[in-house]
Amino acid sequence: MKICKLYLVIVILMLSNSFIKANSEIPRGIDLGEYAFGIPISELSLHENVCNFTLSFWMNPKEFIQTSGGTLFVNIRYVNDMWPLCDWGYFWSVINHLHSEFDLRTEFSKPDWLNIDKELLTFNTSEWKYFTFVFSDVNDSYTNMALYVNGSYLGAIEGDYSISLKGNELIMIGGSNFSSFPLNAYVDKVQFYNKALSQTEVEESMMTPLLNDESLLG
């Protein structure tokens, strides 16, 4: 069954194995413990010139460390690559709690920022939010990344393929780089689809994974 495939390929990078009991006060899910949860690009139905996929998950932050570089959130990179790709890679996002905004950036050589105002998106400890990153091809040269939080569309950015996926990258929730602090949070119900979900599908996947959709890899 296709839903089982990704269970075999998900890599947990130095990840704490603790799971939190579910009740009305204590969050449940995987405790990242400031490490990273990674999915290898090489095991997915993606290649250099096709970039249609969706990553969704619930996240509950435990704390944010006040550093100028913010907190690394979601990124796509190969950590053994040459500098600066090993840190910045294909895509990265930073929670900049010093300025109460959520910054997203695609590509290294020609960056494009998406700044979400604090009126639209705030991060509070002990609060669960459902994040969806939808990547879709625009043409042979550009890809689009749309951000949804709790099923609501917050904005999109467009980046070029000057640095394209090589197949050895990991899609990572959390982790750290030279300037950003690692994410200290609980993560639950990670979903990966090898297509760009519509907003209706994003809203539906909040309640339960789209189990009848062949694009759901795990």
Image (cartoon, rainbow, N blue to C red):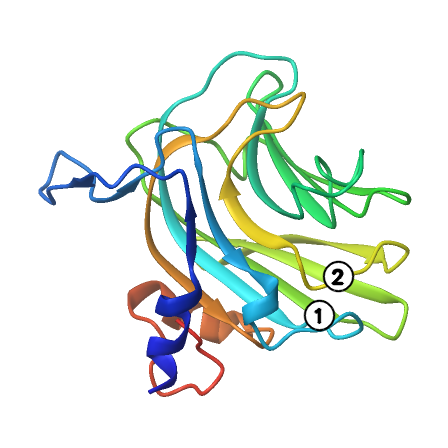
Q: Tell me whether the residue at label 1 lies in contact with that at label 2, contact meaning CB atoms closer than 8 angstroms.
A: yes
Q: Position of residue 45 (x, y in %)?
A: 60, 77
Which residue has dot 2 on it? 165
Residue type at numbered disc 2: Leu
Q: Is residue 186 above or below residue 78?
A: above
Q: Position of residue 91 (x, y in %)?
A: 70, 48
Residue 101, image quadrant: top right
Residue at the location (61% across, 23% down)? Answer: 180
Which residue has dot 1 on it? 51
Mark 2 Cα shell of 10 Å, populated few (<14), some (14-19), many (≥20): many
Which secondary structure, mark 2? loop
Q: Is residue 15 above or below residue 96?
A: below
Q: Position of residue 38 (x, y in %)?
A: 49, 51
For marks 1 and 2, the one nearer the N-term is 1
Q: Is residue 61 left or right of residue 39?
A: left
Q: Is residue 54 left or right of residue 21?
A: right
